[in-house]
Image: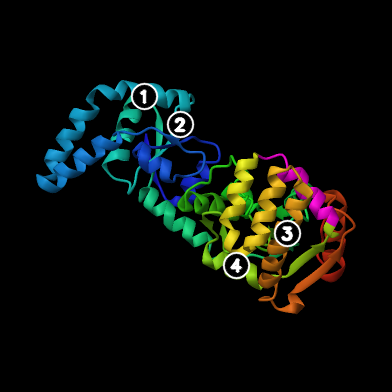
Amino acid sequence: MIQTLDIDKFLQLAETIPVIDVRTPLEFAHAHIPDAHNLPIFSNDERVQVGTTYKQKSREAAILLGFDLTGPKWSGFIKQALKIAPGKKILVHCWRGGMRSGAMAWALNLYGFEVFLLEGGYKRYRNWVLDQFKETYSILILGGMTGSGKTKTLNHLKYHSQQVIDLEDLAQHQGSSYGSMGQLIQPSQEQFENLLARELNKIDKNTPLWLEDESLSIGRCFIPNPIFHQMRQAPVMKIIVPFQERVDFLVKEYGVLDKEFLIESTLRIGKRLGPEQTRDAVLAIRENRMDDFIKIVLVYYDKTYANGQGKREKESIHIIQCSSTNAEENCTLLLNHIKSSFMINTNF
């Protein structure tokens, strides 16, 4: 049986039924529905051949070429689908809900699968993604200077049943010149948006959503403008942590990273850091004086953060004094503050 579903029903079923994306490996690698499996009908080169035939000859000629190219593959498609969905229930889509997904649905249905097709394909899904950014959310911003342990504090807020989206985790970047940590690989902008939309769709809009104070870009990923605008208007819970505590925290986080990576990242901000500071920071890295290195670059990052805070309404910034970067203690302080200041039930 083959059923065609709208995007909402399709994504609802996707929580329990596997999704296969029959677009090319290149299309899938660029961006896809989170957790989908790639079962490409055409290779990257084959899709080009079919598209060229469609434009230069005719639709019928392209269809015949498609059958010639895929003829020996159908048994393999079915075997792969069985591994992905042994229960023989499967969700299928291509780019626009056209011939590729239709052909796959036909073959799987013939074999006995219950197949659900996405109306409008991945293109419709992308419209759904953009729609999530137009919604209004009850955002609370967790602010604080670099090294305040904000990400760890967010994790504790989540542990205490608060709604949290870790934007840096979605972007696979810590937000500074050193943010890749020398090993993280960022998703494409489109995939970052797909991941964010999935998280936003889970949110109860009447309950606070905690986000970390970020600039518009997190590495090469940009926060969608409608969400970033809401973030700039939202109340900020700014945790103030003693300077040396922040230095010690960052030494533990970054001091163990590859020195050449740290030097390269420092040189990348050299113009903004200043020639003397850049020279001193690089020398400190080479001599393994990580405490000194962190103190030098923090001057730049603290100034940058202060400039960003200066663009907010002062009344929107709430100061929470913290004695350390201890995430559990700071989480308690935050929850007590919003409970008393905003009369929000934190369930804490």
Query: Was residue 245 drawn as part of the magenta stretch in this picture?
Result: yes
Q: Residue flagged by tag 4: what amino acid is it?
A: Thr
- Tell me how far mark 3 sits from mark 4, CA to CA: 34 Å
Q: Are marks 3 and 4 in contact (CB under 8 Å)?
A: no
Name above or below for residue 78 compared with residue 341: above
Which numbered circle lies on residue 136?
A: 4
- Tell me how far mark 3 sits from mark 2, CA to CA: 54 Å
Residue annotated with mark 3: 298
Q: Residue flagged by tag 2: what amino acid is it?
A: Lys
User: Residue 332 location in percent, x, y?
Assistant: 87, 55
- What kind of secondary structure does the magenta stretch mostly adopt? helix
Sequence-wise first label, 1 or 2: 1
State the residue in front, 33 or 113. Answer: 33
Sequence-wise first label, 4 or 2: 2
Q: Residue flagged by tag 3: what amino acid is it?
A: Leu
Q: Residue at x 25, y 39 (%)?
A: 47
State the residue in front, 276 or 96. Answer: 276
User: Residue 142 location in percent, x, y?
Assistant: 73, 61
Q: Is residue 322 visible?
A: yes
Query: Was residue 45 drawn as part of the magenta stretch in this picture?
Result: no
Q: SS of the residue at dot 2?
A: strand
Q: Residues within 10 Å of mark 3 (few under 14, many from 20)?
A: many
Start-end of magenta stretch: 244-257
Closer to the eye: label 3 or 4: 3
Sequence-wise first label, 3 or 4: 4
Query: Which quadrant is home to the N terminus?
Result: top left
Q: Residues within 10 Å of mark 1 (few under 14, many from 20)?
A: some
Which numbered circle lies on residue 89?
A: 2
